[in-house]
Image: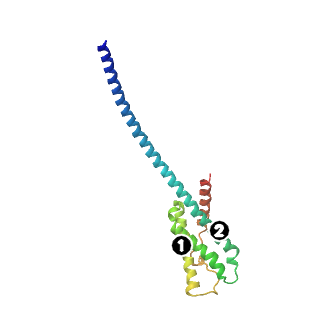
Amino acid sequence: MSELLKQILGSTIITTLITSVIVYFFHKRTERQNALIKREFEKLSQKDTAHFEWRKSTVELLGQVYIHLNRTSLGFKNSYSKLKKYDPFYENEIMYHSNKHIRDLLINNGHYLPPELLDEATKLIEHFDVWLTKYNQVRTVEKNDQARQIYVGPDGFPFPENAEKMFKDKYMEMFNGLHE
């Protein structure tokens, strides 16, 4: 009987040892697969987070541009073009600061712009560059306070209305998409 017991115990120990080795290798394989899945998930999560942050920053940028475009548009239609004589406060506070602010926003934050707005941003920047240059020439260099308001459309640089429309439409689209 003791010989039979020795064989049973011996084969049990060998079976247990072999089973332990197999379980160990399966466990290690499972750990490696879990680590790989975790890394892939983290990579996708980081990509999604980065995309969300870019969209959030883009909406913030477009929102500022939207407000300043509205400010200058309303100011231009309601007051600026109707002024009988030059009003330095109005021109400086409304037109100059908003035109400069929009231009600076676009130049400094162009990396947040969606590709379909890059050409339109260039048109806005060009218009505002010319307007700011003419403003500086007339008001600062020539110190001409008698001249009417500064217009650059007749100089070949009309305000790019399509760019304004595209910026406003994109802002509304992205804002709504971000907050759904």
Q: Residue 146: percent from the left, percent from the top?
A: 64, 87
- Residue 62 vertical placement versus 20 (above, below): below
Q: Residue 89: percent from the left, percent from the top?
A: 65, 80
The crowding category of the residue bearing disc 2, from other C-alpha atoms within 10 Å (few below 14, some 14 to 19, many at least 20), is some
Residue at disc 2, secondary structure: helix
Q: Amino acid at mark 2?
A: Asn
Tell me what residue is drawn at x 39 percent, y 35 percent.
27
- Residue 73 vertical placement versus 112 (above, below): below
Quadrant of the rendered image containing residue 12? top left
- Residue 150 vertical placement versus 106 (above, below): below
Q: How is the image coloured?
A: rainbow
The crowding category of the residue bearing disc 1, from other C-alpha atoms within 10 Å (few below 14, some 14 to 19, many at least 20), is some
Tell me what residue is drawn at x 35 percent, y 25 percent.
16
Quadrant of the rendered image containing residue 3? top left
Residue 165 got which mark? none
Q: Residue 76: percent from the left, percent from the top?
A: 66, 74
Residue 70 got which mark? 2
From the viewer's side, name the closer residue of 93 and 34.
34
From the viewer's side, name the closer residue of 16 and 1.
1
Residue at disc 1, secondary structure: helix
Q: Residue furthest left?
A: 3
Residue 126 got which mark? 1
CA distance for labels 2 and 1: 19 Å
Q: Is residue 121 visible?
A: yes
Q: Is residue 158 visible?
A: no
From the viewer's side, name the closer residue of 1 and 85.
1
Q: Are marks 2 and 1 in contact (CB under 8 Å)?
A: no
Q: Earlier in the sequence, mark 2 or mark 1?
A: 2
Q: Amino acid at mark 1?
A: Glu
